[in-house]
Image (cartoon, helix red, strand yellow):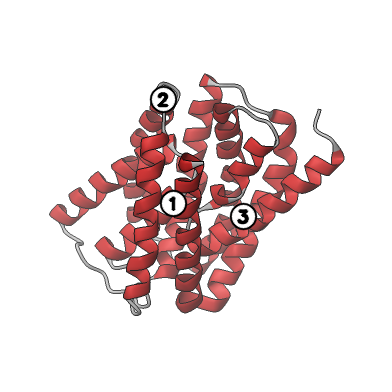
Amino acid sequence: MVNIFDQIVLLTISLIANTLSALAGGGAGLLQFPALLFLGLPFTTALATHKIATVALGAGATLKHWRQGNTQWFFAILILISGLPGVILGARVIIEIPESIAKFSLGVLTIGLSVYSLCKPQLGQDHTPINRNARGYFIGAAMLFTLGVLNGSLTSGTGLFVTLWLILWFGFDYQRAVAYTMILVGLFWNGTGALTLALLTPVKWEWLPALLTGSALGGYCGAHFAVKYGNPVIKRIFEGVTMLVGLSLILSVTF
């Protein structure tokens, strides 16, 4: 059984990590997943427990974002049907293979997201729809499937890629892109990955109440701040979180 001190630590870390994640459009694993490893969980058990907890992040953020009217059913369905098969595939693959090369590569790419956004001051500041044709939807869906594989197999950062992909390929602003990521990735992709992992590896169920509470509160708070402060603040948070997530992934492999 986990003691009260550990429960408080888990709740605090989960609240902070998921508030930042709901603001940036991903990155909850930056603090939450390493904390589970530090407290003694094996890698796959920590991953499954983390994935289940992040479902509450999506639920908390959904309560706030859905009422703002920044999402459309068509894109919600596109993200779901494109990404979910990849999530299931990725969750099954990670149980079988080492992930050090994938984590290092993802870390480098995630830092690249931060640098790219920093070099593009107007990126994601305005909603300018593009690639809304058959070819555009096909390419967009193919990339979402690839990101789904990463989401199912890795611990942190993939939601950030979805956020930036929606901005770059479909022309969303940061606020809309984050809303889609939190609702579809946070709730449905993570839920599917969590279920798949839970069927394949043990879960630390007694730690979940604190993690779920922190995730839900953090998701709602982050979404509230995203709606309140808008694209300029979300962009800066996104850049900071992507840089930290990328460094975290690289350091987890090299040390």
Q: How far apart are marks 1 and 2 (CA)?
A: 19 Å
| Label 3 vs 2, first from the N-terminus | 3
Q: How far apart are marks 3 and 2 (CA)?
A: 26 Å
Q: How far apart are marks 3 and 1 (CA)?
A: 13 Å
Report the side of 70 relative to 210 (left or right): left
Residue on which disc 1 sits: 159
Residue on which disc 2 sits: 92
- At label 2, which amino acid type do we have? Arg
- Residues packed near mark 1 inside 10 Å, few (<14), some (14 to 19) or many (20 plus): many
Report the side of 218 relative to 131 (left or right): right
| Label 1 vs 2, first from the N-terminus | 2
Relative to residue 8, is residue 69 depicted above or below?
A: below
- At label 1, which amino acid type do we have? Gly
Residue at 61 percent across and 50 percent down: it is 31
Circle 3 or circle 1, nearest the eye: 3
Residue at 60 percent across and 63 percent down: it is 222
Residue extending furthest right? 4
Relative to residue 26, is residue 5 depicted above or below?
A: above
Viewer-proximal residue among 147 and 128: 147
Please say if the residues under marks 1 and 2 sit with CB atoms less than 8 Å apart.
Answer: no
